[in-house]
Amino acid sequence: MPATIIRLEQVAKIYGSGNTEVRALFNVSLVVKSGEYCAIMGPSGSGKSTAMNIIGCLDRPTNGSYYLDNVDVAGLDDSELAHIRNRKIGFVFQQFHLLPQLTAIENVMLPMVYAGMPSSERQDRAADALHRVGLGNRLQNRPNQLSGGQQQRVAIARAIVNHPVLLLADEPTGALDSHTTKEVMAIFDELNASGMTVVMVTHESDVARLSQRIVWFRDGEVLHDHLSPDSLSEVTVLS
Amino acid sequence: MDFVESLKMAAKTLTANRLRSGLTMLGIVIGNASVIMMVGVGEGAQEYVSEQIEGLGPNVLFVVPGSQETQRATFNVPKTLVLSDAEAIVEQVAAVDNIAPEFNDRGLITRGNRTSNATIVGTTPGFTTVRNFTLKQGRFFTDLDMRRSNPVVVLGPDLAERLMDNRDPIGQQIRIKNVSFQVIGVLDEKGSNLGLNYDDAVIIPITTMANRLVGRTSPYGIELTYISVSVEDENQMDAAQFQIANLLRLRHKIVGEDDFTINSQQDLLEVTGTITNALTIMLAAIAGISLLVGGIGIMNIMLVSVRERTQEIGLRKAIGASQHDILMQFMIEAVILSAAGGLIGTGLGISGALLIGVASPFQPGISVTAAVVAVAVSGGIGLFFGVVPARQAAKLDPIVALRSA
């Protein structure tokens, strides 16, 4: 029985109050086990981004509770959340978000800098992570010297370097062409195969189909939760 | 994140944007350079004035006509001191060693077709000892010259050079205010002293001056501009000052306010010290304003930088930077900018002060304290003006920051 990584219980997120109140999420319950590869889909405004932010500890739920790796996150303050993001979660973004003034290896070392790790260990681990994503020969390149696919791979290396329990990707292929999309997806596959839990928000059904499970959001609720990717066509029809 | 890492990170960010960092620093650089330079100039001026006053000698008193009140009106100072007052002082005050009464005027000096407008000093033979002058050539006038009102003159060295064209000045005839005088001596160079440059003056017996040149004597005798008094012993200064005052009050039949003032070197030092101090503070304050403006410049650029780097801030937060980490990062950037600017400014200020030293008569003081304080203050300015932008950065919501395009 694999451990539970994400447990959302009756989570609601409400922005504003009174007449301007916006209910981005209500009564979302979701469990993701260790080693799962889960895609979150849904139209704009469906609440998937809000869910993503809560799962990523960038935001707190208004109601309900969220356990990440069996820790109740709802009650944590800002610096404790920062610590959780640093140690337990690896983020991959659509726009890569690499720092332009740093080299590839320096970008990958950044989370370990915030973790307070000594310099020599940082170097070794960052180099390992870059080797793992196939960029062992690009350690000293700056982001503007790398292609989009390579930049996203640097970002993935940065996400996994602190050995997080959860890899959280927000439209990771949104800025890539179909060829590099395949490259990047192969890396996600590989990471998942080696036991990494992956949660990915995406628009692209091709990308989502590569996962083992698809969670559909609509109007702030979970519409469908399918364990088999074969059911994707059916879901597409439903939505 | 530890402090060294923060420093490295800030240095990387600042060097990645060299032009902007340089321009941001410029305000602090200029502010600091001007503070150092202005304080240096102020201290130099103070030193210069003190030296001049100390050059008068520690055992010299100056008796000037008019009370402190009337002296404040610089025009029409009453001529209440006369030659017989000076004679009485040297005869009746035991502590007094010698006196040099002076009656100063200006007039045209000519020799052949050369003319020069110079100070005319009428004094007594005591002048050289009291005012510490030596002669380059010839002799000073004597009591006999005084008694006879002889038309003899001692020239200041600069004036001698201008009038004589390499000729031996001794024995030459010159005309002072159209009266013929024989040159008997030339003073050694001494430089200007409290605004009066004896290097560029003619010195004649005071009796000659009164009888042949000016021709205006009060009913009490020859009027004086001031009297320099040398006291035998430094320890007797207070006694001498007291006795001279009593003597003059008696002679002038004073019951109310004195019609004269006695200054010692110490008095003059105190007065000028206050003035030059005020001047230094004023200069430093003006320069300090530019330092302040530099600080505001840093705040301005840091605010722009926070706006520009929202995505970076969002990312840093997403991968584990706490509010404190972000706050520190921006504070350190601001402090590095201002402290580096402060150091460069101090360097420039010191070089500037040295340059002024080359080009002016006084030597600007380069005070280590001023330098240390200026660098510390500019660092503090960075700290102060960095707080607002850094707090803004730290408070950014990572979700909003990451989504901003």
Image (cartoon, coloured by chain):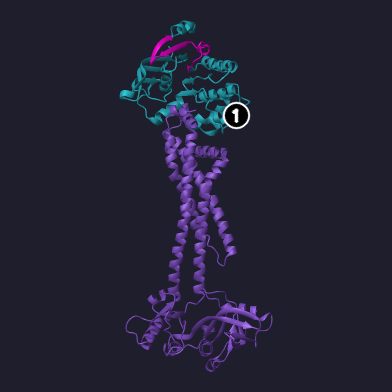
Q: Can residue B152 be seen in the rendering of this structure?
A: yes
For the record, the magenta segment spans: A199-225
Residue A217: where, in percent of width, then height?
Answer: 42, 14
- Rate crowding at label 1 as few (under 14), some (14 to 19) or many (20 or more) other CA atoms within 10 Å: few
Residue B106 quadrant: bottom right
Tell me the amino acid under the disc marked 1.
Asn
Residue identified by numbered label 1: A144
Q: Which chain letter goes with mark 1? A: A
Reply yes or no: does residue B104 show up in magenta. no
**Residue most toward the right?**
B166
Location of residue A223 by image quarter? top left
Residue at figure coordinates x 51%, y 15% from the top left: A192
Report helix, strand or loop for mark 1.
helix
Q: Is residue B233 above or below residue A234?
A: below
Q: Is residue A116 visible?
A: no
Q: Colour of chain B?
A: purple
Which chain, by letter, is cyan?
A: A
Residue visible at 46% across and 23% down? A89
